[in-house]
Amino acid sequence: MIVVGGSSSRELAKELASILDCKYVQAASMRFPDGECYTRIDEESIDGEAVIVQNTYPDTNMIEMFLLQDAVRQLGAEKITLVIPYFGYARQDRVFKPGEAESAKVMCKHLNLNCDRVLTIDLHKESTLDHFTCPRRDLKAASAIAEYFENKNIDLVLSPDIGAAGRAKDVGDRMGVPHDHLEKTRLSGSDVRIAPATMDCKGKSILIVDDMISTGGTIVAAKEALMEAGAKSVSVACTHGVFVNNALERLTGSSLDAVLCCNTLENSVSHISVAPIFAKALKEKW
């Protein structure tokens, strides 16, 4: 087995290769003056399985993934496994209005043309992987988040809404602390109360967990409401730190005790590694 790192996932790919005790190759990638992508794997040949670690977000990384798939096949790889830490276009998983494309399905079908198995983590909807015909698995980052925070004196784990309550339960159960979800209650035409659905947050150190943080607006509003309700501290952790429009600056500049994400998207706060989770799945027969 050889691990090939794409430009979006260098550190994760290196760590993954180290855990698996196999060869690591960093693909050389560049952009021509007209913006087109060029990538090359500096190997004479590849025997056995090639594991490509690369995000498919934004668009430029999706194109690089297609080229990496072809490159490892040209080098003789007998089996290609895609490790996609953050799967781009997964949120458009159905047609909402006539004339729209079902983006998640389109991307799966194109990636499926040149791979033998696929690994993702905390996909927006696990059913998206049904568009692949090869073996595929969506892994969960809860164990990595729980391990990181297990000695941080967290009293309560919350999800931003009931739809993500299962994630809060998973993390909370692993840490041995209670879990709940945040609930919005409209008090008047202009006032909305945000609070845990059933648990009291007064005097507690709270961890909010989510699969993704994009703009950060929901987290900031939740933090302010929890602090007003008497919470001792509020931290936040997510799997995918997308952080658009200066969201990371807004979050780190607020009174949040900690802002962290997994290293599916590499940035200044991606200190929770999911490499061991991917490594365990790669070692298994499936």
Image (cartoon, rainbow, N blue to C red):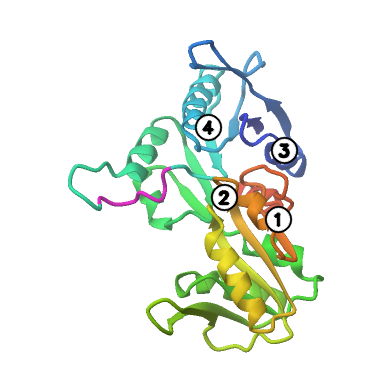
- Residue 93 sits inside the magenta stretch: yes
Indicate the amino acid at tag 4.
Lys
Which comes before the other along the chain, label 4 or label 3?
3
Q: Residues within 10 Å of mark 3 (few under 14, many from 20)?
A: some
Residue position marked by numbered label 2 in the rendering: 285
Secondary structure at badge 4 equals strand
* 44, above or below 55, in the image: above
Q: Position of residue 178 (x, y in %)?
A: 65, 83
Secondary structure at badge 2 equals loop
Which comes before the other along the chain, label 2 or label 1?
1
Quarter of the image for residue 72 reads top right
Residue position marked by numbered label 1 in the rendering: 252
Judged by depth in the image, the label closer to the viewer, 1 or 4, is: 1
Q: Is the magenta stretch mostly helix, strand or loop?
A: loop
Indicate the amino acid at tag 3.
Glu
- Residue 92 sits inside the magenta stretch: yes
Q: Where is residue 84 in the image (x, y as percent from the top left)?
A: 54, 42
Residue position marked by numbered label 3 in the rendering: 11
Q: In this rendering, does residue 81 appear at all?
A: yes
The residue located at (49%, 52%) in the rendering is: 137
What separation in Å lies between label 4 and label 3 (alpha carbons)? Answer: 23 Å
Indicate the amino acid at tag 2.
Lys
Which comes before the other along the chain, label 2 or label 3?
3
Q: In this rendering, does residue 284 appear at all?
A: no
The residue located at (50%, 17%) in the rendering is: 35
Residue position marked by numbered label 4 in the rendering: 79
